[in-house]
Image (cartoon, rainbow, N blue to C red):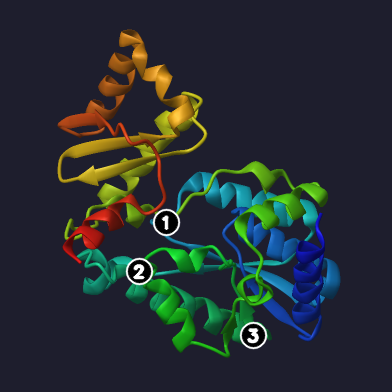
Amino acid sequence: MNETMEARLARLKEILRDHKRLAICFSGGVDSTFLLKVAHDILGEDCVAVTAVSPAFSAREMQRASAFCEAEQIRQIFVETRELELPEFYENPPDRCYHCKKQLMGAMTDAAAVAGYPVMVEGTNADDISDYRPGLKALEEMRPRITSPLLEAGLTKAEIREASRNLGLTTANLPSFACLATRFAYGERITAEGLKRVEAAEEILAQAGFTQFRVRVHQNLARIEVAPGEMEAFSSEAFRNEIYSKLKALGYAYVTLDLAGYRTGSMNETLRERG
């Protein structure tokens, strides 16, 4: 651990210590798990996890989040969200994430306040500001009810992973997984059925042994992204046929492999091309 990282971790702890009671927006991913662990170690019972129950989050993620809170004996509050009732969400415009985040975080902060936790913190890190993320605008509009201590402390994803390993967290090497709504091309209507289908498709890839992947949806076409180092699996005709058959059975008319491999925010590439 270098001096810069040590200073950033010290700053994070200082930020968290300044709060007497905190609610943590907790999804069970790398960033929020690390943040919850550090905050709970400092504040104990004055720290609570708040988890969204949404069709846009997979059952696998929900199970991981619940298992962590149970193992660490952290109180967890569940909040049902209603993104699918918002035209600004299900019509899937380029700023969908802004409207979704505003609704989701509003519901979560309200639930936390009722439980006696007036401030919520969430896991945006220093690397997140480099991509197109309209959800960050929603967070800015909701301050000071919501803060982003990892970002404030300047911690990067790599540093959070290293610090997580030092704490013995199993999420240290967990692949990044965003909300399932990010799998749909902008303008593609998002439905509960579509979200379940893409969740099932990605579960097929997880069961096949892939670690970093996405199934992107373009109408009736499923575009598979996997890490470049894992792409060789598709050189087997038998394996290709197996994956193709399973995704076809879910209702996709076409199944294709993206030769560029997995990358964060690939749906935003069309926005950059327009710009």
Residue 119 circle label:
3
Residue at point 41% right, 80% down? Answer: 137
**SS class of the residue under badge 1?**
loop
Q: Nearer the viewer, mark 3 or mark 2?
A: 2
Residue type pointed to by label 1: Cys
Residue 41 in percent (x, y) is at 84, 66
Residue placed at 79% from the left, 59% from the top? 73
| Residue hosting label 2 | 97
Q: Quadrant of the N terminus?
A: bottom right
Neighbourhood count class around disc 2 (C-alpha, 10 Å): few under 14, some 14–19, many 20 upward: many
Residue that sits furthest to the front in the current view: 3
Q: Percent from the top left, x then y, of residue 209? A: 51, 25
Q: Amino acid at mark 2?
A: Cys
Left or right relative to 101: residue 114: right
Element type at mark 2: helix
First along the sequence among labels 1 and 2:
2
Name the spot of residue 6 as percent of width and height, x first.
Answer: 81, 64
Whether residue 194 is situated above or below residue 227 in the rendered picture: below
Q: Are marks 1 and 2 in contact (CB under 8 Å)?
A: yes
